Image (tube, grey):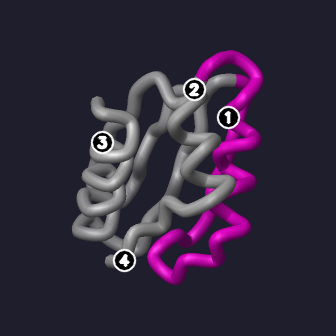
Amino acid sequence: MPSAFTGRLNTIFRECVTSFDYAQNIIVIHTLPGLANAAASALDAMNMNVVLGTLAGDDTAVVIMRDTNAAAAFCGEIKSLIGG
């Protein structure tokens, strides 16, 4: 999967993601308060075919990926981006 973290998404994730993890094809992303919706919206705007959808609250976003491999790869990209 090519890197999805460019421009707006890169900035949002670097500045607001506090932690993340995945189980099977679901990724849970924790953000600073009030920023989960921005992170989910940025992901939705990327129109990646491996992302089936997102759901966000105040400080937590859930990302539904197409499969476990996509979730693992995406978490690897997040880790590289934020140094987690």
Q: Position of residue 12 (x, y in %)?
A: 63, 41
* Nearer-N-terminus badge (2/1): 2
**Residue beneath disc 1:** 36
Position above or below: 28 against 41: above
Q: Are marks 2 and 3 in contact (CB under 8 Å)?
A: no
Q: Residues within 10 Å of mark 3 (few under 14, many from 20)?
A: some
Q: Amino acid at mark 2?
A: Thr
Q: Quadrant of the C terminus?
A: top left
- Is 19 on the left-hand or right-hand side of 75? right
- Is 60 on the left-hand or right-hand side of 5? right
Position above or below: 83 against 39: above
Position above or below: 80 against 74: above
Q: Secondary structure at mark 3?
A: helix
Q: Are marks 2 and 1 in contact (CB under 8 Å)?
A: yes
Q: Residues within 10 Å of mark 1 (few under 14, many from 20)?
A: many
Q: Amino acid at mark 3?
A: Lys
Which region is colored magenta?
A: 32-58
Q: Position of residue 16 (x, y in %)?
A: 59, 28
Q: Residues within 10 Å of mark 2 (few under 14, many from 20)?
A: many
State which mark lies toward you, 2 or 4. Answer: 4
